Image (cartoon, helix red, strand yellow):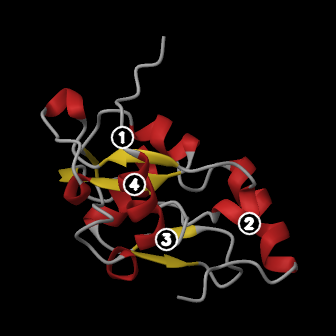
Amino acid sequence: MSTQPYIAKQLREVVSKQVQHRCGYCLAQERVVGTPMEIDHIIPQSLGGPTEEDNLWLACSLCNDYKGNQVAGLDPETGDLTRLFDPRHQEWGDHFAWTESGDRIIGLTATGRATVTVLNLNRLSLVRARQAWVAVGWHPPKD
């Protein structure tokens, strides 16, 4: 039995279009990875987060799995407990950057560093995939 909450098809489509069909965390594009993105509750339902547009975003299955019901993580630089990145209300480029080669994500802020660590945004399989995507000009996203 699925534990995923019911989310109306129309709401799924609205959220998917808003985020251009890509993961709000690692920016993997649905058309590149070939699997549908999942609807992520930014504040998980288990912590009282509602199933409404303002609390929903897309995530690839692995980022969503790593995130689970977490909303905070340790900043590896300071050791401080820090809120994770909120793709609905924060700008990706304020907290993250790509390495020159485009295959790894650098956390620029405490939020970015904690999110890179908790969601394992530089996991080996994803870095290898990004290297291939960069080679054919599909990555990193230009916008």
- Give the Cα separation between the discs numbered 3 and 1: 32 Å
Q: Is residue 29 left or right of residue 17?
A: right
Relative horizontal placement of residue 128, taking residue 99 as reference (left or right): right
Picture layout, residue 22 above or below residue 80:
below
Disc 2 versus disc 1: nearer the observer: 1
Q: Earlier in the sequence, mark 3 or mark 1?
A: 1
**What's the distance in space between the residues labelled 2 and 3, CA to CA?**
14 Å
Residue under pointer 3: 106
Q: Position of residue 58 (x, y in %)?
A: 45, 55
Specify which label sits upstream in the sequence, 2 or 1.
Answer: 1
Q: Amino acid at mark 3?
A: Ile
Q: Give the spatial CA distance, label 1 vs label 4.
A: 8 Å
- Residue tagged by mark 2? 130
Label located before the other in sequence (2 or 4):
4
Q: Pick whichever, 108 or 33, lies toward us.
A: 33
Secondary element type, mark 3: strand
